[in-house]
Image: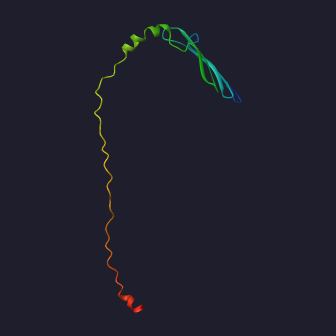
Amino acid sequence: MSAEVGVNHAGDAYNFHYAAGDAGGHRRVESGHGGAVSGSYSYVDPNGHLRTVSYTAGPDGFKATGDTGVDKKTADDAAAIAALAPKAPEAPAPAPVHHWNYAPYYHAGAWVHHGVPNYAHWGAYW
């Protein structure tokens, strides 16, 4: 098994490559400049086939080409693979909960008694 990594920066541009595994089992190459990126990656799938995907990314979004879907054998076996997945237990829906909306309640302030005014002392000024 071998691995190789290389990175080169020059201003806002870069180049990157990575390879690992026997006979290029995993490989990635990428370069970018000014916000645009292009590259590719490859790997050996569980069926032993080399899968390669190329991509670009920039102002127009991400676009991939190549082996982006599943292989024919996996697609043909999809129903059998799904049957092996654990099933979620069935549970009844929870009972609805009613939240009461009560009418607003008027909270009166404390009652303060003000006595009858006493004007007896005003007589001296009239």
Q: Is residue 39 visible?
A: yes
Which is nearer the eye, 38 or 58? 58
Q: Is the N terminus in the top left, top right, bottom left or bottom right quadrant?
A: top right
Residue 103, percent from left and from top: 31, 50
Residue 87, percent from left and from top: 34, 19
Residue 41, percent from left and from top: 59, 17
Taking the view exactly as shown, the residue that stands out farthest to the front is 126
Residue in the image at 28% along x and 27% along y: 92
Q: Is residue 118 left or right of residue 42?
A: left
Which is nearer the eye, 51 or 2? 51
Q: Is residue 29 visible?
A: no
Residue in the image at 64% along x and 21% along y: 38
Which is nearer the eye, 18 or 119? 119
Q: Is the C terminus in the top left, top right, bottom left or bottom right quadrant?
A: bottom left
Residue in the image at 40% along x and 12% along y: 81
In the rendered view, tell whether residue 94 sits above or below residue 123. above
